[in-house]
Amino acid sequence: MARFRQRPRIALVPAASIAAVSAALAAAPAVAQDQAAEADDNAIVVTAQFREQNLQDTPLAITAVNAEMLEARSQTNISQVAAQAPSVTLKPQGTAFGPSMTASIRGIGQYDFNPALEPGVGLYIDDVYYATLTGSMFDLLDLDRVEILRGPQGTLAGRNSIGGAVKLYSQRPRGDNSATVSAAYGSRDRVDLRASADIGISETLSARLSGVSKLQDGYIKRMDFGCVNPAGESSLNPAGGVPRILPETADDCVLADEGEVNYQAVRGQLRWQPTDRIDINLAADYTHDHRNVGGSVLLLRENEAGAVVSPNYPYPPNPAARVFDINPFAADIPYDSRFVCGPYCNYATYMSLPDNGSPLQVVDGRSRYDGWGVSGQVDWDLTDNLQLVSITAYRDYRTRFSNDDDLTPLAHSLGSGDLTFWSFSQEVRLNGSLFDDKLEYTIGGFYMDQRSVYATTQNLRYAGLDPFLGNDPVNADTKAAFAHLSWRPVDPLTLLAADVRGRCPSAARRARRRAWRLRPQPLRLSPQRDVRDHAGHLGLCPVVDRLQGWRHQPAAVLRAAGAVVRSRDARIVGSRFQERAVRPPGALQRRRVLQRLRGHPACAEQLPAGRAGLRRALRAAGQRR
């Protein structure tokens, strides 16, 4: 099958000088053959267009790295590969986002880990789609190559990705009874172990097993503020201030090391090749990642006048000015530069002590991820120019994480999350070629059903809110059909045409609607308590109606009260959902919303008074719509 095999590259060797032309011509055939063989050995073969092609012959914006290059560069993490690819960003997220990453290509991507949101960059392992950013900071375990495709991937991948796609391909079993073992030791007691074994069971059946373990101590010291600065003995911690957490017999004042590594993963494959036209590969994997949260430090920042602007929370408390009490201690301790520990330490405690009726909340400051999956791929060459591919996969994981955003003993903000997820996907592709491989095409279908529940507890005392719980279920499914056509009228010119894709759009909207419908604790608007959970939302007017938790600017409120079905300015309190679908409220509901807003100080001057003014506002909103 010429279409599915690599096309050879030939390197030409020019003669060294005119005087050596005759000798060079005599040796040219042998040299050309040697150079061509060397070029074939060093060529990177990719399958970005669902068929094996030389990287140099693929008409796409693509970066590819093979196993030899990964080993030579000592790259063991997907973010290290992305750092060398132009316009690609794959980086770990902060503690509030759990064990996830931010992924973007050419500025298009996603940072929110919540499964209700689509990643802007598609992530694949052996053509199996990973639907969330959580658990996607892959280790490069026993890989054959990595392909990074820039630009929209709607016809070249099972799931549509507007930014691009990152694809990892594992080494398949060869049955050669080989094995590899590698170990590394480094600073902070770093210990890396990697091993793989390829076993030939019979002439048609082979297996491959690989595993990795990575351990390393953290680089950020979480210090006990009351131990470093004993209460009553330091000007930074007066009597009645922050108490000591560690016992008096402790050797030092270190509570924990943040930024540590404790990662283990194993992967097994079973390959059956009953004929030279059928290739069946089954795979299973498990990942265990338990560690302290990622390292964070407070930075001291001053303005041009030399005044400290960070860390700086207004003091003393003044609820009328929306400055709430975050100090649970008897002594006056403001949130200021006393909590700047240094470049490699912080004073986080991962607890909020009881105060002003708020209960004690304690989290463990750790991140846990356990995930597993199984998949099966069938490659069937129906003819020399027609191939059928089927990819079936199931994935499941649970992650628990916590965050102490203020990094101090004060009760500014504290949160924890528990996310469970599973997905089932099925993809079928038919690859073919016509007219001596000058016309190549792919048609296929993709289906995915995914379920998740994100349970969270948030204690945001800096916003004057009581602790609240979130329980966001997402039930989403995707159905898609895609086609890809490429024509090569002359070599090496390739024309891509007839790139079409269809998708059932109701699944994502249904998932978003269910999420806000099932929020357990709707927030209620009152003139005494506003809802602003981030400083960037100052000036926003909170709206709480049947949609529960939506917030708009006053001008956007009137538009929503009219007939706007979707608002891109909306945010949900205590959650990071964005751009959720909403249904237009009825006339009675619109009236209640505006009446409630009219009594709020932030909106009193911006909304009309009286029935006549209300009707005018609604008519104007409808006209703007």
Image (tube, helix red, strand yellow):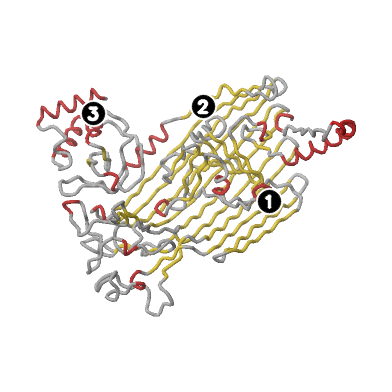
Up/down of 85 relative to 287, above or below: above
* Amino acid type for the residue under numbered disc 3: Gly
Quadrant containing the N terminus in the rendered view: top right
Residue 208's disc number: 1
Up/down of 278 relative to 243, above or below: above
Image position of 447 (left or right of 614):
right
**Quadrant location of residue 415?**
bottom left
Q: Earlier in the sequence, mark 3 or mark 2?
A: 2
**Can you tell which of label 1 and label 3 is closer to the viewer?**
3
Nearer the observer, 168 or 238: 238
Image position of 116 (left or right of 535):
right
Quick check: marks 2 and 1 in contact, CB under 8 Å? no
Instruction: Name the residue tied to disc 2.
Output: 501
Question: What residue is rendered at 79% in x and 38% in y?
Answer: 37
Residue 277 percent coordinates (x, y): 73, 35
Q: Earlier in the sequence, mark 1 or mark 3?
A: 1
Quick check: marks 1 and 3 in contact, CB under 8 Å? no
* Amino acid type for the residue under numbered disc 1: Arg
Q: How crowded is mark 1: few (under 14 residues within 10 Å), some or many (20 or more)?
A: many
**Can you tell which of label 2 and label 1 is closer to the viewer?**
2
Residue 25 percent coordinates (x, y): 87, 31
Residue 335 percent coordinates (x, y): 28, 60
Residue 562's disc number: 3
Residue 176's disc number: none
* Amino acid type for the residue under numbered disc 2: Arg
Q: How crowded is mark 2: few (under 14 residues within 10 Å), some or many (20 or more)?
A: some
Question: What residue is rendered at 39% in x and 49% in y?
Answer: 454
Tell me how far mark 3 sits from mark 2, CA to CA. Answer: 34 Å
Question: What residue is rendered at 51% in x and 48% in y?
Answer: 136
